[in-house]
Image (cartoon, rainbow, N blue to C red):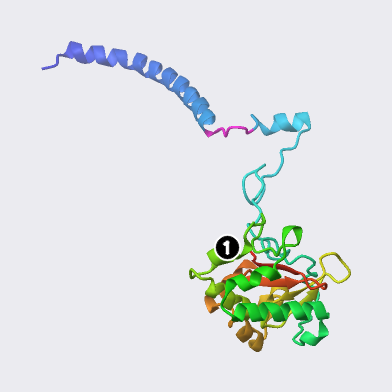
Amino acid sequence: MRTGKDMSSRISLAPVVLAVGLVAGSVLSASSAYALSELQKIPGQPDAPAATAQQGQTQPAAPQNGSPGVPQPDPLVNKNSGQGVDKTPGASDDSKPVEVIYDISKVPEPVRKMREQIVEAAASGDLERLRPLMGTGADQTQVTVGEPTDDPIGTLKDLSGDPDGDEILAIMLDVISTGFVHVGQGTADEMYVWPYFAEKDLKSLTPPERVELLRIVTAGDLSDMQEFGGYNFYRLGIAPDGKWKFFTAGD
């Protein structure tokens, strides 16, 4: 049980405790306010707007998109410029209309003769019959994109879905049976290219043209090509002098 003396002591000490509490509270409030201002400060932010104004400096506005100083990546495929599509040498600008040719009598005789020989060899089912038509050395027909191969017939057989190369011969016949285009007129890359889809905007195909293309590729392939930005299946090129320049698939 507390006595009167105890209560008297607590009462006499009350003003002192209250005074000490007020002083301590003032110090604590000032310290807390200072600490809070430090926590709210963002790294890189100026200490005070007035300091910046005095120095005559202007803080750059934050960019609306992305982080400052970090460039946005370019698209993997620029479809407007045709980047990513393996274009035929000597090909014309995509903005120009493509003249599709079906009449083989309109080409030079050496071109007509080489096409006829390719058709006969492919229809025979014997891949080796193509070898004499492919030339040698620098004039050898290109069958791969990039580094040339020492054995174009062996390469074509490897590309075929069967061990004898029958599939690649069938593809060759399908490709060279379509309409074609004349590209690179007046240049060293002048040639006649099958199929004409290699130089045409696939998104602008007419219904008959779509059917003609679907004789070569599947509907899924066509959809992928339209997304990719251009025809990327096999194409065949013959120079005006009758040399068989290439039979390749573009990536």
In the rendered image, the quadrant that contains the N terminus is: top left
- Provide the residue designation for mark 1: 154
The quadrant the C terminus occupies is bottom right
Q: Quadrant of residue 147?
A: bottom right
- Depth check: give the residue in front, 51 or 15: 51
> Where 93 sits versus 18, above or below?
below
Q: Position of residue 192 (x, y in %)?
A: 77, 75
Residue located 51% across and 71% down the image: 164
Is residue 111 rendered magenta in the image? no
Residue 4: image quadrant is top left
Q: Is residue 16 above or below residue 77?
A: above
Q: Residue at x 77, y 85 (%)?
A: 104
For image coordinates 80% across by 77% down, the residue present is: 110
Residue 131 seen anywhere in this rendered image of the structure: yes
Tag 1: residue type? Gly
Q: Is residue 42 magenta?
A: yes
Instruction: Left or right? Give the position of 175 relative to 23.
Output: right
Element type where label 1 sits in the image = helix
Q: In the drawing, does residue 54 fall left or right of residue 24?
A: right
Q: What residue is at 25 percent from the left and 15 percent from the top?
A: 10
Q: Position of residue 178 (x, y in %)?
A: 68, 83
| Spot occupied by residue 58 in the image (x, y as percentages of width and height) | 75, 37
Q: Which residues are magenta?
A: 40-45
